[in-house]
């Protein structure tokens, strides 16, 4: 039994055609649309025409700016105004030659949560110093670029909350200690 194409049926549980288990069918919007026009490589029509280095049966569109290999539309990657083949892009990424190619980011929200939780587990008296640090890192995470993969702000809020609770507990300990010392 093929998957239904009607949107009203897609939001319900359906039986899998292979195993019979009930599964929830949720499709991305791109499922209803075909592939974008002009992206798929065209076949070589005339003998002697330039062909893609990676796909010999596809027509070349542009040469690589680094190595000069011919590329089809599928292999062509435009970066900083230059057309690069996949192997040159990978080599340039390893060498760090492309400044526009971002491959890593600091996860400030995870760092804030780590600064808030780790001292509780390892050496709790250090929380007097790390709690304000967790709050600052949590606030900083709102103003810095997040992960390359979109994530929620839950980690940052948890770090800020834990930092505030730790500071509150230290204030309580300090008040109890001072009142006990006065008596």
Image (spheres, rainbow, N blue to C red):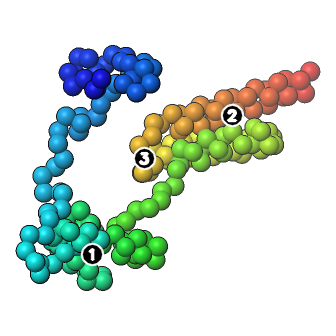
Numbered label attached to residue 53: 1
Q: Residue, x 42% and y 75% (percent of image)?
A: 91
* Callout count: 3
Q: Is residue 83 left or right of residue 42?
A: right
| Most foreground residue, 14 or 8 | 14
Residue 47 or residue 108, whichever sits in front = 47
Q: CA distance from mark 1 to mark 2?
A: 62 Å
Mark 3 or 2: the one toward you? 3
Q: Is residue 96 visible?
A: no
In which quadrant is the C terminus drawn? top right
**Taking 151 as reference, is 11 above or below it?**
above
Residue annotated with mark 2: 167
Tell me, yes or no, whether the two marked residues, 1 and 3, touch with CB atoms within 8 Å: no
The residue where tag 3 is placed is: 149
Q: Position of residue 177 (x, y in %)?
A: 85, 28
Report crowding for label 3: few under 14, some 14 to 19, many 20 or more residues within 10 A (C-alpha): few
Q: Does label 1 or label 2 sit earlier along the sequence? A: 1
Mark sitting earlier along the chain (1/3): 1
Q: Quadrant of residue 51?
A: bottom left
The circle on residue 69 is none
Answer above or below: position of 158 versus 9. below
Q: In percent of the image, x 54 and y 37: which residue is there? A: 155
N-terminal label among 3 and 2: 3
Label 1 Cα neighbours within 10 Å, binned few <14 / some 14-19 / many ≥20: some
Q: Are marks 3 and 2 in contact (CB under 8 Å)?
A: no
**CA gap, disc 3 and disc 2:** 32 Å
SS label for mark 3: loop
Instruction: Tell me which residue sits at (19%, 65%) in the image.
Output: 73
Residue at the spot 25% in from the left edge and 23% down from the top edge: 4
- Of badges 1 and 2, the one in the foreground is 1
């Amino acid at each position: 039994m093929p998957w239904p194409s009607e949107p009203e049926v897609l939001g319900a549980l359906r039986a899998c055609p292979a195993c019979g288990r009930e599964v929830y069918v949720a499709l991305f919007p791109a499922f209803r649309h075909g592939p974008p026009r002009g992206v798929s490589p065209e076949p070589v029509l005339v003998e002697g025409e330039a062909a893609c280095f990676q796909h010999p049966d596809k027509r070349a569109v542009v040469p690589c700016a680094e190595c000069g290999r011919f590329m089809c539309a599928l292999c062509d990657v435009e970066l900083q105004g230059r057309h690069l083949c996949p192997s040159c892009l990978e080599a340039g990424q390893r060498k760090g030659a492309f400044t526009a190619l971002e491959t890593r980011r600091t996860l400030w929200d995870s760092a804030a949560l780590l600064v808030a939780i780790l001292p509780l587990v390892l050496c709790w008296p250090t929380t007097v110093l790390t709690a304000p640090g967790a709050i600052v890192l949590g606030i900083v995470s709102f103003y810095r670029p997040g992960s390359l993969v979109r994530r929620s702000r839950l980690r940052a809020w948890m770090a800020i909350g834990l930092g505030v609770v730790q500071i509150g507990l230290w204030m309580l300990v300090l008040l109890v200690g001072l009142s006990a010392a006065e008596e």
